[in-house]
Image (cartoon, rainbow, N blue to C red):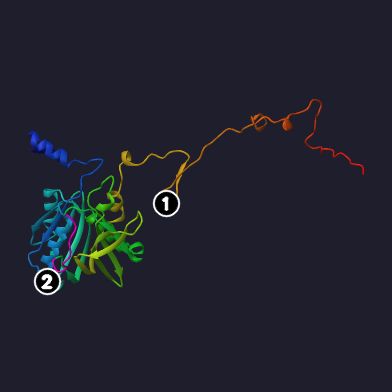
Amino acid sequence: MTQLDGIVKPKTKRSKRFLESRAPKLIEDVKNTMIMKGGNTSQTVTTALKDIYSLKKPNLLYSQCSLLVPFQEFFSKKSDCSLFLFGSHNKKRPNNFIFGRMFDFHVLDMFELGIEKFISLSQIKTSKFPEGTKPMLIFAGEIFDTDNNYKRLKSLLIDFFRGPTVPAVRLAGLEHVLHFTALEGKIYMRSYRCLLKKSGCRTPRIELEEIGPSFNFVMRRTHLASDDLYKLANRQPKALKPKKKKNISHDVFGTSFGRVHMQKQDLSKLRTRKMKGLRKRKGEVVDEDQEPKVAKVES
């Protein structure tokens, strides 16, 4: 490939296909995740990264990197990864996780979370869910909707764990639940397996069984994009925006309501069932303002 005036021109068909795969699309591909292990890590961080790797299979890349800042954008562009997780450990910030995401191969948001308590997948002796299962995400805590940092963290975690977009999901495929709770400055992450039990009716009874991993995080440092850059990253192409249909509205539950416009009807010409009592007699003309006369009955 040759580069002229900032424009990369392919020389071979292989490089042309590569550039077409990296070009912007109306419907983007599944976001890949890059998990990086720092030069100094503890056994807790190493095991936690492996458990996150097990949850995120198969759309991810695992590598080892000594420093985060100089190499994150290089690795992101090389491997086409828009999400990353960096694990490290030192005396000042022990058992450290950095969650982040990219926009146009540049850092958009980063959150530094410290691991205070960790229970791995292997420590909980229960049956696990199949690889590649799309999880259900639950966020509990009012702060996820009020604080700007927690709003961005919620958006990042949804991007990180949501998995591929699918048109439909079968009931038996809803096996994995990820629950995030924000309480008193800490973030609790729990992983459950959804069990469908017999309930005696058509709808099954649902039970949750903890399978791990289990994290107790504390937020340390944040790096947020500006409002303009964040708005640009969330901009949706016009071709994907749903076209607004006239006289159709939706309520908060997604129910559609339609309004039908009709011309004014003349009820006098409305054809009803013919009855002798409703027939007009000849010579009877009654004014609308005049009250009908009541026949007097002599006793």
- Magenta stretch holds residue 99: no
Q: Position of residue 104 (x, y in %)?
A: 20, 48
Q: Residue at x 13, y 58 (%)?
A: 35
Q: Which numbered disc flags the more N-terminal residue, 1 or 2? A: 2
Describe residue 284's horizontal placement relative to residue 141 as left or right: right
Question: Label 1 neighbourhood size at 10 Å, few (<14), some (14-19), many (20+)?
Answer: few
- Quadrant (top left, top right, bottom left, bottom right) of the C terminus: top right
- Magenta stretch holds residue 129: yes
Q: Residue furthest top?
A: 282
**Where is residue 34, by image quadrant?**
bottom left
Q: Which numbered marker is on residue 253?
A: 1
Q: Amino acid at mark 1?
A: Phe
Q: Position of residue 195 (x, y in %)?
A: 26, 60
Q: Which numbered marker is on residue 90?
A: 2
From what the image shows, is residue 40 above or below residue 292?
below
Describe residue 277's horizontal placement relative to residue 80 as left or right: right
Residues in magenta, as a range: 122-130
Q: Position of residue 230 (x, y in %)?
A: 29, 53
Secondary structure that dominates the magenta span: loop
| Element at label 1 | loop
- Is 144 or 269 nearer to us in this picture? 269
Question: Label 2 neighbourhood size at 10 Å, few (<14), some (14-19), many (20+)?
Answer: few
Distance Cα–Cα, label 1 vs label 2: 49 Å
Q: Position of residue 198 (x, y in %)?
A: 30, 59
Describe residue 185's horizontal placement relative to residue 294 as left or right: left
- Quadrant (top left, top right, bottom left, bottom right) of the N terminus: top left
Q: Residue furthest bottom?
A: 91
- Is 113 or 290 nearer to us in this picture? 290
